[in-house]
Amino acid sequence: DGTTVTAQHVADALNKLNEKNDAAKASLGTMTVTALDDLRLKIDSENPTPVMDAVLAEWVFVVYLEKNGKFLFTGPYAVETFTEGVDIKLVANPHYPQAVERPLITMKKYADGDALAVALKAGEIDMAFHL
């Protein structure tokens, strides 16, 4: 929605993720994120790490803002539709640079690695994980 992202927004998101999602504890254990000002954070974690930038790039650390009952995310894409157990359709985030240059993306769930491999071999998908 164009809201300026602040350190407090990031701290709120990371703290909630660490509280609610056990995967967010995999590298750091329990953590507390505090906004020092509008642009800086302090992260205290149960498990120290020399590579905090790499840890924060893990899939689970998504920066978002919960506003008026909606979840707003940072990044080049926004969720257009989510059909549980079927797919997620992503559209370019209009508030992110070069939005018009990015294609639509569909992330589809397959029954197993074999079905995924068949779809990849047939050219129905561009990439696959966990074959």
Image (tube, helix red, strand yellow):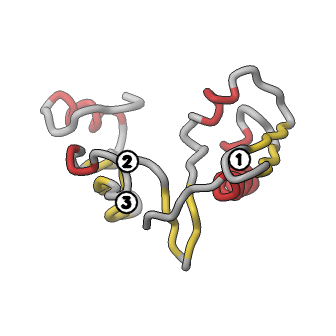
Which one is in front, 38 or 118? 38
Q: Position of residue 55 (x, y in %)?
A: 65, 31
Alpha-carbon distance for marks 3 and 1?
A: 23 Å
Q: Amino acid at mark 3?
A: Val
Task: Classify residue 128 by image quadrant.
Answer: top left
Q: Residue at x 74, y 53 (%)?
A: 15
| Residues packed near mark 3 inside 10 Å, few (<14), some (14 to 19) or many (20 plus) | some
| Residues packed near mark 2 inside 10 Å, few (<14), some (14 to 19) or many (20 plus) | some
The residue that disc 1 covers is 22
In the rendered image, the residue lying farthest to the top is: 50
Mark number for residue 76? Answer: 2
Q: Are marks 1 and 2 in contact (CB under 8 Å)?
A: no
**Quick one: label 1 or label 2, which is nearer the N terminus?**
1
The nearer-to-camera label among 3 and 1 is 3
| Residues packed near mark 1 inside 10 Å, few (<14), some (14 to 19) or many (20 plus) | few
Q: Residue at x 73, y 49 (%)?
A: 18
Q: Is 95 drawn above or below residue 124 in the view shown? A: below
Mark number for residue 79? Answer: 3
**Quick one: label 3 or label 1, which is nearer the N terminus?**
1
Alpha-carbon distance for marks 1 and 2?
A: 26 Å
